[in-house]
Image (spheres, helix red, strand yellow):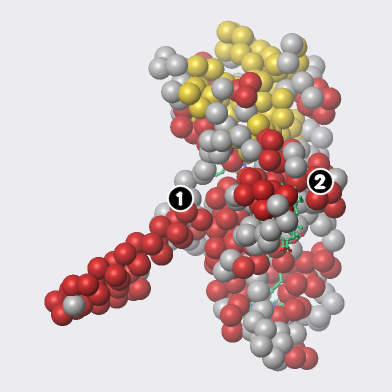
Amino acid sequence: MTTATNVLKWTRVFAVAMPVCALLILVYSTWVSSSVQNRLPAKPLVMSTSTRNTQQRCQDCHSDITDNYHTAPHARTLTRADTPSNVSDFDNKTFHNNAANTDIHLKVTNGHLNITTQGYTRPVSATWIFGSGTHAKTPLITWLNEDGKTSGIEHIVSWYADGELGVTLGMDEHLDSEGIGCLGGPRTAAETINCFGCHSSYVPVENGRLVLDKLEPNIGCSRCHLNTRQHVENMDAGHASTMERFSELTPTESIDRCGECHRRAEELGGEILPEDTMITRFASVGLTQSKCFVNQAEVMVGPDTVARLDCTNCHNPHRPTSRNWQDHTAQCLKCHDAEHDRAVDCPTAKRNSNCLECHMPSVPANKHLSFTDHWIRVRPATK
Ligand code: HEC
Ligand code: HEC
Ligand code: HEC
Ligand code: HEC
Ligand code: HEC
Ligand code: HEC
Ligand code: HEC
């Protein structure tokens, strides 16, 4: 804000004295802001061109990454209802809705998950299941609305990693809904496109209608690495790589790239309060509130080396998350290291203790699902 105001103020000063100079400044500041915006799409970005052919080439030269990529939750964010894993988790199952005293029956036939219940007697079905199952899987019921646009209902029943069916996060209020509402939360056409946008590599949309048979599900390489076609051309021609490296972005730019889907603080609107438990769902919002993130440039880890904290300290997006707390606390100790006088040390606990339990705990979101609170801080409960 202040920078923008300053630029404006100086632009005015120059405009009186030197119009040419003012013009240059304006051109420059427009260029800077547009180049930043190109890297930081404000809305979930739906990829409008297929990158399948380019992406098939990655394995020629990066088999170390592609060979195991299928183990990453990013590689399984969206699946068809009839995969063996979905059949085993949903087919022939019944969920009893205690509030309305109704049953919801699930059956996989001809590629669709058919959903029947006394609460809504017309037959409905879901072709797509969202979520890898690392934490949860939710069917999305889709149909064309009266304007011919694809709309959705986020189904009230989800499969959770504990192996049970349960109420989808945030859907308890629909349990005693009547009519179509008893199936879950209705999503507008725009919201439905966004569901697919954050869970896919390429989403073809024609006049608001999703072309679901051409959709490329899951987060492929080109969804995070931009300009891959140029990169492959360069590599084939023996030129140097011009591809962006995440480590060359500033920590905020890097986190905002993940935040395109994991959310950004400015998108939430209003003040961000530690008491708001919804924030735990949005790792990139939480982490950026931490003093560790905000003050990272003050920590020297070598004579000329500043510490760095972004998502990649603890996560390799090509792999599942490590469940070993020591892998994560090793990152804390890079900065909070009393022996080297880098950042303040914990007055309460020893170096080899599990910092996460007190400063980055797992917080239950419902009976089956927990999120890790990425807002690293001294929490009232630990006092
Ligand atoms: C013909 C071989 C080849 C293909 C195909 C290829 N790469 Fe690369 N890639 C390389 C080489 C070599 C480097 C290292 C370049 C360097 O260090 O200057 C590299 C580097 C990278 C980097 C690190 C950034 C950088 O500039 O060093 C990323 C990210 C990357 N590749 C992603 C991809 C993705 C995604 C694909 C598939 C769309 C892909 N590459 C296809 C050869 C290839
Ligand atoms: C195009 C959207 C998108 C982008 C960009 C994205 N993610 Fe994700 N990410 C997802 C989705 C969707 C899931 C849920 C996967 C599932 O269903 O389990 C996920 C899951 C994760 C998980 C949980 C994995 C686990 O093992 O539990 C981590 C960690 C993660 N992402 C980190 C990152 C990081 C770091 C970046 C930036 C480098 C990033 N993501 C960028 C969409 C995205
Ligand atoms: C702005 C991007 C974005 C949109 C839009 C979006 N998701 Fe996700 N989704 C994510 C990310 C990131 C994750 C992983 C972290 C999390 O749980 O929020 C995820 C995780 C999930 C999971 C796995 C459970 C879990 O919590 O990890 C399910 C199921 C899911 N999303 C369903 C949906 C459905 C259905 C819609 C549309 C109503 C939707 N998502 C819209 C980004 C998005
Ligand atoms: C969710 C976002 C995301 C996806 C999807 C993704 N990458 Fe990456 N990739 C990253 C990040 C972030 C880094 C930087 C890692 C770091 O600095 O530790 C990276 C680094 C790389 C590198 C540089 C070498 C390295 O290990 O640092 C290569 C090569 C690469 N990715 C290839 C791929 C390929 C091939 C795919 C598809 C199979 C892919 N990436 C999918 C985010 C992603
Ligand atoms: C990149 C360096 C860096 C990393 C990595 C890091 N921190 Fe920090 N942390 C800092 C800095 C700098 C501060 C601010 C210290 C100050 O206020 O003087 C801080 C502050 C804190 C505080 C006090 C916060 C408050 O609100 O008062 C806690 C607690 C903390 N860190 C714990 C951790 C834990 C646990 C980890 C690992 C999960 C971690 N930090 C990782 C640099 C880091
Ligand atoms: C200091 C280490 C650390 C950093 C930095 C970090 N995470 Fe995590 N993250 C964790 C730990 C620990 C878990 C829980 C692992 C487990 O389940 O055992 C986790 C879990 C997750 C999950 C799975 C759902 C959940 O909440 O448990 C997602 C999604 C995620 N992180 C996204 C991100 C994103 C996006 C960033 C960057 C904004 C990020 N993380 C930065 C340590 C970190
Ligand atoms: C048993 C819970 C517990 C564990 C485990 C724990 N801490 Fe703490 N930590 C606290 C409490 C409580 C405070 C606040 C102390 C106070 O204000 O007097 C604190 C304060 C801090 C601070 C802020 C210090 C300051 O002067 O502002 C940092 C940094 C910190 N811890 C880092 C860590 C790191 C790194 C680890 C893991 C090696 C860790 N903590 C493990 C409970 C814990």
User: What's the residue type where badge 1 is placed?
Assistant: Ala
Ligand 1 positioned in quadrant: bottom right
| Drawn side of residue 149 relative to residue 356, left or right | left
In depth, the one of 1 and 353 nearer the eye is 1
Quadrant housing residue 275: bottom right
User: What's the residue type where badge 2 is placed?
Assistant: Asp
> Relative to 304, is 247 above or below?
above
Residue at (64%, 57%) from the top-left corner?
Answer: 243
Instruction: Give x and y (percent) for residue 148.
Output: 45, 16
Q: Which residue is mark 1?
A: 42
Residue at (75%, 72%) from the top-left corner?
Answer: 331
Q: Secondary structure at mark 2?
A: helix
Residue at (66%, 13%) from the top-left corner?
Answer: 116
> Relative to 248, is 205 above or below?
above
Instruction: Give x and y (percent) for residue 304.
Output: 66, 88
Marks 1/2: CA–CA distance: 33 Å
Q: Which residue is mark 2?
A: 60
Mark 1, Cα crowd under 10 Å, few <14 / some 14-19 / many 20+, is some
Q: Secondary structure at mark 1?
A: loop
Disc 2, ligand 1: is the CB inside 8 Å? yes
Most extreme residue toward the left is 16
Most extreme residue toward the front is 237
Quadrant housing residue 168: top right
| Image quarter of the N terminus | bottom left
In depth, the one of 353 and 68 nearer the eye is 68
- Mark yes or no: residue 267 visible: yes
Residue at (72%, 81%) from the top-left corner?
Answer: 336
| Drawn side of residue 41 relative to residue 196, left or right | left
- Mark yes or no: residue 278 visible: no
